[in-house]
Image (cartoon, helix red, strand yellow):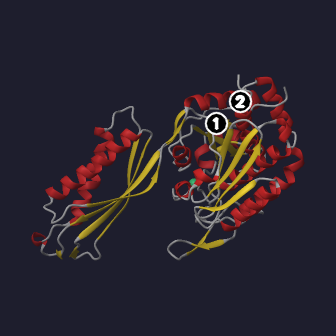
Amino acid sequence: MSTSEHSPRSGGASAHAVTEILAGQDDMKDWLHDLYRTFHRHPELSNQEVKTAERVATELKDLGYEVTEEIGTTGVVGVLANGDGPTVLMRADMDALPVKEDTGLDYASTDTATDADGNTVPVAHACGHDVHVASLLGAARLLAEAKDAWSGTFVALFQPAEEDATGAKEMVDDGLADLIPAPEVAFAQHVLAFPAGQVSPHAGPFLSSADSMRITVHGRGAHGSMPQLSVDPVVLASSIVLRLQTIVAREVAPDDFAVVTIGRISGGSKSNIIADRAVLELNVRTFDTAVSERVLAAIERIAIAEAQASDAPQEPEFELYDHYPLTENDEATTTRLTEAFTAHFGGQVTDRGRQSASEDFSDIPSALGVPYSYWGIGGVDPDTYAAAEKKGTVSADIPANHSPQFAPVLEPTLSTGTAAIVVAALAWFGGSGN
Ligand SMILES: [Zn+2]
Ligand SMILES: [Zn+2]
């Protein structure tokens, strides 16, 4: 029998190791809170996470990690090799949003940045990625300071540009696979608007896939008084918008999930001119790649047919962009993870079901060919949440991600986010306390 054979699920030893590692949480609380406030106060837009990445790299180096920087644009990876055992990858996204913070916090952001179109915009961590960065640094520190309690390799990955769905792919395309030891499993987490202290794992599809599509339809321009000389693209686009509503209603099976939203329609310049083109921008979300393919094909079929019905001089043009892959948590991985969470967090583990939001994280484990699980952690003061729940006003009173008022409470959000990573990693590493 090989001596390198590892027993990552030696339950008692693992629980003992988790307790030993998390004992360091009290000592690092001030450091962790300071880090979090700094990230929160100085958010950076997608692919501009320069200062955040620098701070992350500095902290990781101080902790003894082997650090690679500028993967993709600003991606950072820290590797802590600590003897035999599995390699576990944990990812945190670093970017913020062009949102004007309205939380009233004394560490609220007042920063601005120049966006991709050259406009000066306010920036805020309205999606809570600062929680992810601070939590991962916290876990990285705990693991580095208790190396006797576990063995294996921990990979802390800090990703740019989640909000525009490009960051994970950028890191993969920049050779991520060659920069890190091959992981056995990959994890990520997101702070969400449910009670802090709670952890929400979910097996199977967890976050929807999302695709945006731009459709340009062509008509024939004419004077507004001479419609007989035109092919009116505004009427054509309008027909397409109405007919697209039948995809979810009539083509997708009732128990399959799909959303088709036409978020933008534009065409023409003046009331008495018939334009020669119109543009539709739409967004598709599903929990099943086959459903997504069927919906996208139906959209093209309908647009082409409506253009033909209008006698358009040219077929519509289709452009896909902002593709978010499906986040589908591996069953076996999630079962093992949930057992470990339950052993540590007890009744604070609540499966809150799948979410219609989207993420690009899975591009990383998919490219590396490893199973993954992505879970939610709460960020709302538990008493505030309970009061809103009692009044039936959760959706009105509890600001969700991307809201200018989104403000996770420091605790127990950060200690839970940090502990969840340690508990997850230890479910693979196992403890050495045997
Ligand atoms: Zn977001
Ligand atoms: Zn987010």
Compared with 97, 276 (above or below) is: below
Which residue is rendered at x = 86% and y = 35% of the image? 20
Residue 67 lies in what quarter of the image? bottom right
> Which mark is in front, 2 or 1?
2
Question: Which amino acid does the dot numbered 2 rest on?
Answer: Ala
Which residue is rendered at x = 70% and y = 63% of the image? 52
Which residue is rendered at x = 84% and y = 39% of the image? 21
Helix, strand or loop for disc 2: helix
Residue 137 is left or right of residue 250, and the answer is: right
Q: Is residue 104 visible?
A: no
Q: Which mark is residue 260?
A: none
Which residue is rendered at x = 48% and y = 43% of the image? 326
Of the 4 image quadrants, the one containing the C terminus is: top right
Q: Which mark is residue 200?
A: 1
Seen from the viewer's position, the closer of residues 218 and 321 is: 321
Query: Of the residues under marks 2 and 1, which one precedes in the sequence?
Result: 1
Image coords of residue 422 (percent x, y):
75, 40
Compared with 423, 310 (above or below) is: below
Work out how far the residue at label 2 is from the one at label 1, CA to CA, in angstroms: 12 Å
Instruction: Check disc 2 and report the residue beneath it.
Output: 340
Seen from the viewer's position, the closer of residues 115 and 158 is: 158
Residue 72 is left or right of residue 8, and the answer is: left
Image coords of residue 294 (percent x, y):
32, 42
Q: Tell me if the residue at label 2 has its CB under 8 Å from ligand 2.
A: no
Question: Which amino acid does the dot numbered 1 rest on?
Answer: Ser
Q: Is residue 372 visible?
A: yes
Residue 290 is left or right of residue 432, and the answer is: left
Image coords of residue 421 (percent x, y):
72, 41
Query: Do the CB atoms of the residues marked 2 and 1 lie less than 8 Å apart?
Result: no
Helix, strand or loop for disc 1: strand
